[in-house]
Amino acid sequence: MMSTSAYFRPVTRSQAAQGGSKFADLKARAQALQTTRSRGGKSTPTAPGGPSSSTEQAGPSQKKTAQKRVKREHTKIEYEAKEGGDAKSSSRSAKPKTTLSSIKKERWEPERWGEHLENIKRMRATRDAPVDTMGCQTCPDEAAAPKVKRYHALISLMLSSQTKDQMTSAAMKRLIDHGLTVDNILKTSDQKLGELIYPVGFWKTKVKYIKNTTQILKDQYGGDIPATVAEMVQLPGVGPKMAYLTMDVGWGKVEGICVDTHVHRISHRLGWLKKPTKVPEETRVALEEWLPREHWSELNWLLVGFGQQTCLPVSPKCGGCLNKEICPFEKSQLRYSKNKKSPKK
Protein backbone atom coordinates (compact mmCIF):
# COMPACT_ATOMS: atom_id res chain seq x y z
CA MET A 1 0.00 0.00 0.00
CA MET A 2 1.33 3.46 -1.00
CA SER A 3 2.11 5.77 1.85
CA THR A 4 0.30 9.08 2.19
CA SER A 5 3.57 10.95 1.91
CA ALA A 6 3.62 10.07 -1.81
CA TYR A 7 0.66 12.37 -2.35
CA PHE A 8 2.37 15.33 -0.72
CA ARG A 9 5.71 15.80 -2.37
CA PRO A 10 7.78 18.85 -1.46
CA VAL A 11 7.63 21.71 -3.98
CA THR A 12 10.70 23.61 -4.98
CA ARG A 13 10.87 27.38 -5.49
CA SER A 14 11.20 27.03 -9.26
CA GLN A 15 8.11 24.85 -9.42
CA ALA A 16 6.17 27.30 -7.28
CA ALA A 17 7.23 30.18 -9.53
CA GLN A 18 6.22 28.21 -12.60
CA GLY A 19 2.79 27.47 -11.04
CA GLY A 20 2.33 31.13 -10.22
CA SER A 21 3.05 32.15 -13.81
CA LYS A 22 0.45 29.63 -15.06
CA PHE A 23 -2.15 31.04 -12.68
CA ALA A 24 -1.33 34.58 -13.85
CA ASP A 25 -1.65 33.44 -17.45
CA LEU A 26 -5.10 31.94 -16.84
CA LYS A 27 -6.23 35.09 -15.05
CA ALA A 28 -5.02 37.25 -17.96
CA ARG A 29 -6.91 35.13 -20.45
CA ALA A 30 -10.09 35.38 -18.38
CA GLN A 31 -9.79 39.15 -18.31
CA ALA A 32 -9.22 39.25 -22.07
CA LEU A 33 -12.28 37.11 -22.64
CA GLN A 34 -14.37 39.34 -20.39
CA THR A 35 -13.19 42.42 -22.32
CA THR A 36 -14.07 40.73 -25.61
CA ARG A 37 -17.61 39.91 -24.45
CA SER A 38 -18.24 43.42 -23.14
CA ARG A 39 -17.14 44.94 -26.50
CA GLY A 40 -19.36 42.79 -28.74
CA GLY A 41 -16.78 40.17 -29.70
CA LYS A 42 -14.13 42.59 -31.00
CA SER A 43 -10.76 42.43 -29.32
CA THR A 44 -8.73 45.61 -28.92
CA PRO A 45 -4.99 45.92 -28.54
CA THR A 46 -3.80 46.46 -24.99
CA ALA A 47 -0.74 48.14 -23.61
CA PRO A 48 2.41 46.12 -23.04
CA GLY A 49 2.37 44.39 -19.75
CA GLY A 50 -1.43 44.13 -19.83
CA PRO A 51 -3.43 40.97 -20.06
CA SER A 52 -2.47 40.34 -23.71
CA SER A 53 1.24 40.61 -22.98
CA SER A 54 0.99 37.78 -20.49
CA THR A 55 -0.73 35.71 -23.14
CA GLU A 56 2.07 36.46 -25.61
CA GLN A 57 4.56 35.23 -23.06
CA ALA A 58 2.77 31.88 -22.79
CA GLY A 59 3.85 28.82 -24.76
CA PRO A 60 2.67 28.03 -28.33
CA SER A 61 0.19 25.34 -27.23
CA GLN A 62 -1.34 27.66 -24.67
CA LYS A 63 -1.67 30.43 -27.28
CA LYS A 64 -3.52 28.12 -29.70
CA THR A 65 -5.90 26.95 -26.96
CA ALA A 66 -6.66 30.52 -25.94
CA GLN A 67 -7.23 31.56 -29.56
CA LYS A 68 -9.64 28.67 -30.14
CA ARG A 69 -11.62 29.57 -27.05
CA VAL A 70 -11.77 33.25 -28.01
CA LYS A 71 -12.82 32.26 -31.55
CA ARG A 72 -15.65 30.09 -30.23
CA GLU A 73 -16.81 32.90 -27.97
CA HIS A 74 -16.63 35.39 -30.87
CA THR A 75 -18.75 33.11 -33.04
CA LYS A 76 -21.30 32.58 -30.32
CA ILE A 77 -21.58 36.26 -29.49
CA GLU A 78 -21.82 37.32 -33.14
CA TYR A 79 -24.47 34.68 -33.82
CA GLU A 80 -26.55 35.80 -30.84
CA ALA A 81 -26.17 39.43 -31.88
CA LYS A 82 -27.25 38.61 -35.44
CA GLU A 83 -30.20 36.60 -34.24
CA GLY A 84 -31.28 39.39 -31.94
CA GLY A 85 -30.91 41.94 -34.73
CA ASP A 86 -33.02 39.84 -37.10
CA ALA A 87 -35.72 39.55 -34.47
CA LYS A 88 -35.77 43.30 -34.01
CA SER A 89 -35.79 44.03 -37.74
CA SER A 90 -38.51 41.45 -38.34
CA SER A 91 -40.59 42.96 -35.56
CA ARG A 92 -40.25 46.37 -37.19
CA SER A 93 -41.04 45.15 -40.68
CA ALA A 94 -43.74 42.72 -39.61
CA LYS A 95 -47.19 43.62 -40.86
CA PRO A 96 -50.49 42.60 -39.31
CA LYS A 97 -51.66 39.25 -40.62
CA THR A 98 -54.42 39.39 -43.18
CA THR A 99 -57.23 36.97 -42.43
CA LEU A 100 -59.72 35.58 -44.91
CA SER A 101 -62.50 37.55 -43.28
CA SER A 102 -60.64 40.82 -43.92
CA ILE A 103 -60.26 40.09 -47.63
CA LYS A 104 -63.17 41.46 -49.60
CA LYS A 105 -63.58 39.38 -52.71
CA GLU A 106 -64.20 41.58 -55.67
CA ARG A 107 -67.24 40.27 -57.52
CA TRP A 108 -67.34 40.94 -61.23
CA GLU A 109 -70.53 42.35 -62.63
CA PRO A 110 -71.34 43.83 -66.05
CA GLU A 111 -71.59 47.54 -66.58
CA ARG A 112 -75.06 49.09 -66.38
CA TRP A 113 -76.77 45.72 -66.00
CA GLY A 114 -79.31 47.28 -63.65
CA GLU A 115 -80.37 49.75 -66.34
CA HIS A 116 -80.59 46.92 -68.88
CA LEU A 117 -82.88 44.93 -66.60
CA GLU A 118 -85.14 47.85 -65.73
CA ASN A 119 -85.57 48.73 -69.39
CA ILE A 120 -86.46 45.12 -70.22
CA LYS A 121 -89.07 45.13 -67.43
CA ARG A 122 -90.62 48.27 -68.92
CA MET A 123 -90.74 46.67 -72.36
CA ARG A 124 -92.27 43.49 -70.88
CA ALA A 125 -94.86 45.29 -68.76
CA THR A 126 -97.73 44.40 -71.11
CA ARG A 127 -97.00 40.63 -70.82
CA ASP A 128 -98.23 39.93 -74.32
CA ALA A 129 -95.43 37.65 -75.55
CA PRO A 130 -96.17 33.99 -76.43
CA VAL A 131 -94.45 32.82 -73.25
CA ASP A 132 -96.90 34.87 -71.17
CA THR A 133 -100.00 33.15 -72.53
CA MET A 134 -98.65 29.73 -73.57
CA GLY A 135 -95.62 29.14 -71.36
CA CYS A 136 -95.23 26.15 -69.04
CA GLN A 137 -96.63 28.11 -66.10
CA THR A 138 -99.95 28.43 -67.97
CA CYS A 139 -100.20 24.80 -69.11
CA PRO A 140 -101.21 22.91 -65.92
CA ASP A 141 -104.90 22.41 -65.25
CA GLU A 142 -105.81 24.79 -62.43
CA ALA A 143 -108.60 22.46 -61.27
CA ALA A 144 -106.23 19.49 -60.84
CA ALA A 145 -104.69 18.33 -57.56
CA PRO A 146 -101.27 19.81 -56.65
CA LYS A 147 -99.46 16.56 -57.44
CA VAL A 148 -101.14 16.35 -60.86
CA LYS A 149 -100.36 20.01 -61.59
CA ARG A 150 -96.68 19.37 -60.89
CA TYR A 151 -96.81 16.46 -63.33
CA HIS A 152 -98.39 18.74 -65.93
CA ALA A 153 -95.59 21.30 -65.49
CA LEU A 154 -92.95 18.61 -65.98
CA ILE A 155 -94.59 17.18 -69.12
CA SER A 156 -95.07 20.63 -70.66
CA LEU A 157 -91.36 21.38 -70.21
CA MET A 158 -90.39 18.04 -71.73
CA LEU A 159 -92.51 18.90 -74.77
CA SER A 160 -91.14 22.45 -75.04
CA SER A 161 -87.63 21.40 -76.01
CA GLN A 162 -86.92 22.51 -79.60
CA THR A 163 -90.61 23.48 -79.90
CA LYS A 164 -92.43 26.80 -80.04
CA ASP A 165 -94.77 27.73 -77.22
CA GLN A 166 -97.79 27.63 -79.51
CA MET A 167 -97.21 23.95 -80.39
CA THR A 168 -96.44 23.01 -76.79
CA SER A 169 -99.62 24.66 -75.51
CA ALA A 170 -101.77 22.91 -78.15
CA ALA A 171 -100.24 19.49 -77.34
CA MET A 172 -100.80 20.03 -73.61
CA LYS A 173 -104.50 20.81 -74.18
CA ARG A 174 -104.92 17.55 -76.10
CA LEU A 175 -103.15 15.59 -73.35
CA ILE A 176 -105.24 17.16 -70.57
CA ASP A 177 -108.44 16.39 -72.48
CA HIS A 178 -107.22 12.80 -72.88
CA GLY A 179 -106.39 12.57 -69.18
CA LEU A 180 -102.90 13.68 -68.22
CA THR A 181 -102.26 11.63 -65.08
CA VAL A 182 -99.50 9.19 -64.26
CA ASP A 183 -101.78 6.15 -64.31
CA ASN A 184 -103.60 7.11 -67.50
CA ILE A 185 -100.40 7.88 -69.47
CA LEU A 186 -98.99 4.47 -68.51
CA LYS A 187 -102.12 2.87 -69.94
CA THR A 188 -101.91 4.89 -73.17
CA SER A 189 -100.18 3.21 -76.11
CA ASP A 190 -97.10 4.79 -77.68
CA GLN A 191 -98.98 5.29 -80.94
CA LYS A 192 -101.81 7.17 -79.26
CA LEU A 193 -99.41 9.25 -77.21
CA GLY A 194 -97.54 10.19 -80.38
CA GLU A 195 -100.75 11.30 -82.02
CA LEU A 196 -101.55 13.50 -79.03
CA ILE A 197 -98.23 15.34 -78.92
CA TYR A 198 -97.52 15.59 -82.66
CA PRO A 199 -96.12 17.86 -84.20
CA VAL A 200 -93.78 18.90 -81.37
CA GLY A 201 -90.10 18.62 -82.17
CA PHE A 202 -88.64 15.10 -81.91
CA TRP A 203 -92.06 13.76 -80.96
CA LYS A 204 -91.07 10.08 -81.37
CA THR A 205 -88.18 10.43 -78.93
CA LYS A 206 -90.36 12.38 -76.51
CA VAL A 207 -92.95 9.57 -76.46
CA LYS A 208 -90.28 7.24 -75.07
CA TYR A 209 -89.05 9.86 -72.59
CA ILE A 210 -92.56 10.56 -71.29
CA LYS A 211 -93.36 6.88 -70.87
CA ASN A 212 -90.07 6.04 -69.10
CA THR A 213 -90.21 9.13 -66.86
CA THR A 214 -93.83 8.47 -65.91
CA GLN A 215 -92.98 4.89 -64.94
CA ILE A 216 -90.15 6.13 -62.69
CA LEU A 217 -92.49 8.62 -61.03
CA LYS A 218 -94.95 5.81 -60.39
CA ASP A 219 -92.37 3.41 -58.97
CA GLN A 220 -90.06 5.71 -57.02
CA TYR A 221 -91.99 8.90 -56.15
CA GLY A 222 -95.57 7.76 -55.59
CA GLY A 223 -96.79 9.45 -58.76
CA ASP A 224 -95.28 12.82 -57.82
CA ILE A 225 -92.23 14.57 -59.27
CA PRO A 226 -88.82 14.72 -57.52
CA ALA A 227 -88.28 17.53 -55.04
CA THR A 228 -84.62 18.23 -55.89
CA VAL A 229 -82.76 19.26 -59.02
CA ALA A 230 -80.27 16.42 -58.59
CA GLU A 231 -83.07 13.85 -58.77
CA MET A 232 -84.92 15.71 -61.50
CA VAL A 233 -82.06 15.63 -63.99
CA GLN A 234 -81.85 11.85 -63.59
CA LEU A 235 -85.20 11.47 -65.32
CA PRO A 236 -85.10 10.55 -69.03
CA GLY A 237 -85.33 13.62 -71.26
CA VAL A 238 -85.00 16.15 -68.42
CA GLY A 239 -82.07 18.57 -68.52
CA PRO A 240 -80.92 21.34 -66.17
CA LYS A 241 -83.12 24.01 -67.81
CA MET A 242 -86.26 21.91 -67.33
CA ALA A 243 -85.26 20.89 -63.81
CA TYR A 244 -84.75 24.45 -62.53
CA LEU A 245 -87.95 25.74 -64.11
CA THR A 246 -89.97 22.74 -62.87
CA MET A 247 -88.68 23.33 -59.34
CA ASP A 248 -89.81 26.96 -59.58
CA VAL A 249 -93.23 26.30 -61.14
CA GLY A 250 -94.00 22.97 -59.46
CA TRP A 251 -92.51 23.36 -55.98
CA GLY A 252 -92.05 27.14 -55.71
CA LYS A 253 -88.32 26.69 -55.08
CA VAL A 254 -85.78 28.90 -56.85
CA GLU A 255 -82.73 26.65 -57.07
CA GLY A 256 -81.11 28.29 -60.10
CA ILE A 257 -81.59 30.34 -63.26
CA CYS A 258 -83.41 28.65 -66.10
CA VAL A 259 -81.33 29.36 -69.21
CA ASP A 260 -82.75 28.51 -72.63
CA THR A 261 -81.69 29.69 -76.06
CA HIS A 262 -83.19 33.17 -75.53
CA VAL A 263 -81.46 33.78 -72.18
CA HIS A 264 -78.22 32.39 -73.61
CA ARG A 265 -78.31 34.70 -76.63
CA ILE A 266 -79.41 37.89 -74.88
CA SER A 267 -76.86 37.48 -72.05
CA HIS A 268 -74.09 37.54 -74.63
CA ARG A 269 -75.53 40.53 -76.47
CA LEU A 270 -75.87 42.61 -73.31
CA GLY A 271 -72.35 41.75 -72.15
CA TRP A 272 -73.63 40.01 -69.04
CA LEU A 273 -70.98 37.29 -69.16
CA LYS A 274 -67.40 37.72 -68.01
CA LYS A 275 -66.29 35.58 -70.95
CA PRO A 276 -68.23 33.94 -73.79
CA THR A 277 -69.89 30.59 -73.13
CA LYS A 278 -70.78 27.84 -75.57
CA VAL A 279 -73.78 26.15 -73.97
CA PRO A 280 -76.72 27.37 -71.83
CA GLU A 281 -75.51 25.47 -68.75
CA GLU A 282 -72.23 27.41 -68.78
CA THR A 283 -74.25 30.61 -69.13
CA ARG A 284 -76.33 29.68 -66.08
CA VAL A 285 -73.22 29.21 -63.94
CA ALA A 286 -71.73 32.50 -65.16
CA LEU A 287 -74.93 34.46 -64.46
CA GLU A 288 -75.40 33.01 -60.99
CA GLU A 289 -71.89 34.18 -60.02
CA TRP A 290 -72.90 37.85 -60.06
CA LEU A 291 -76.68 38.27 -60.51
CA PRO A 292 -78.47 38.82 -57.16
CA ARG A 293 -80.68 35.88 -56.23
CA GLU A 294 -83.87 37.95 -56.10
CA HIS A 295 -83.74 38.25 -59.90
CA TRP A 296 -83.25 34.54 -60.65
CA SER A 297 -86.92 33.57 -60.87
CA GLU A 298 -88.11 36.40 -63.12
CA LEU A 299 -85.11 36.43 -65.44
CA ASN A 300 -86.30 33.55 -67.64
CA TRP A 301 -89.74 34.85 -68.54
CA LEU A 302 -88.40 38.41 -68.88
CA LEU A 303 -85.68 37.48 -71.37
CA VAL A 304 -87.72 34.83 -73.18
CA GLY A 305 -90.51 37.30 -73.93
CA PHE A 306 -87.97 39.99 -74.77
CA GLY A 307 -86.28 37.56 -77.16
CA GLN A 308 -89.58 36.60 -78.77
CA GLN A 309 -90.67 40.18 -79.43
CA THR A 310 -87.62 42.45 -79.64
CA CYS A 311 -84.20 40.83 -79.37
CA LEU A 312 -84.86 38.28 -82.11
CA PRO A 313 -82.22 35.71 -83.12
CA VAL A 314 -82.10 37.16 -86.63
CA SER A 315 -82.66 40.83 -87.45
CA PRO A 316 -83.33 42.06 -83.89
CA LYS A 317 -85.50 45.15 -83.54
CA CYS A 318 -82.82 47.32 -82.00
CA GLY A 319 -84.48 50.55 -83.14
CA GLY A 320 -87.39 50.10 -80.74
CA CYS A 321 -85.32 48.76 -77.83
CA LEU A 322 -84.89 50.95 -74.77
CA ASN A 323 -81.36 49.62 -74.35
CA LYS A 324 -80.14 50.67 -77.79
CA GLU A 325 -77.95 53.47 -76.38
CA ILE A 326 -76.28 51.26 -73.75
CA CYS A 327 -76.30 47.86 -75.46
CA PRO A 328 -72.86 46.49 -76.48
CA PHE A 329 -74.45 44.48 -79.30
CA GLU A 330 -76.18 47.51 -80.80
CA LYS A 331 -72.94 49.50 -80.69
CA SER A 332 -71.08 46.70 -82.44
CA GLN A 333 -73.79 46.55 -85.11
CA LEU A 334 -73.45 50.30 -85.72
CA ARG A 335 -69.67 50.01 -86.09
CA TYR A 336 -70.14 47.12 -88.50
CA SER A 337 -72.64 49.03 -90.66
CA LYS A 338 -70.33 52.08 -90.80
CA ASN A 339 -67.30 50.04 -91.81
CA LYS A 340 -69.24 47.99 -94.34
CA LYS A 341 -68.42 49.17 -97.83
CA SER A 342 -71.14 49.58 -100.41
CA PRO A 343 -70.83 47.25 -103.43
CA LYS A 344 -69.15 48.68 -106.48
CA LYS A 345 -71.39 49.55 -109.39
Image (cartoon, helix red, strand yellow):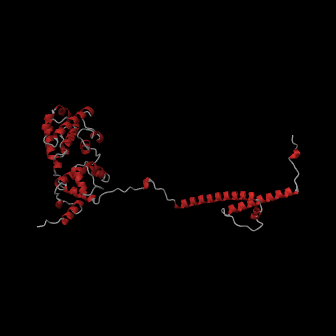
On screen, 301 above or below 333? above
Q: Position of residue 260 (x, y in %)?
A: 23, 49
- Of all residues, the one furthest to the bottom in this rendering is 47
Could you say which is closer to the camera, residue 210 or residue 144?
A: 210
Quadrant of the image occupied by residue 199: top left
Q: Can residue 302 be seen at all in this image of the molecule?
A: no
On screen, 26 above or below 165? below
Q: Residue at x 23, y 57 (%)?
A: 269
Could you say which is closer to the camera, residue 334 or residue 58?
A: 58
Count of all numbered marks drawn on residues in the image: 0
Q: Position of residue 95 (x, y in %)?
A: 50, 59
Could you say which is closer to the camera, residue 275 or residue 242?
A: 275
On screen, 10 above or below 36? above
Q: As drawn, is 187 to the left or to the right of 274? A: left
Quadrant of the image occupied by residue 122: bottom left
Q: As drawn, is 44 to the left or to the right of 251? A: right
Q: Residue at x 72, y 58 (%)?
A: 64
Quadrant of the image occupied by residue 74: bottom right
Image quarter hosting the C terminus? bottom left
- Of all residues, the one furthest to the front in this rendering is 60
Q: Residue at x 71, y 67 (%)?
A: 45
Image quarter hosting the N terminus? top right
Q: Can residue 113 be seen at all in this image of the molecule?
A: yes
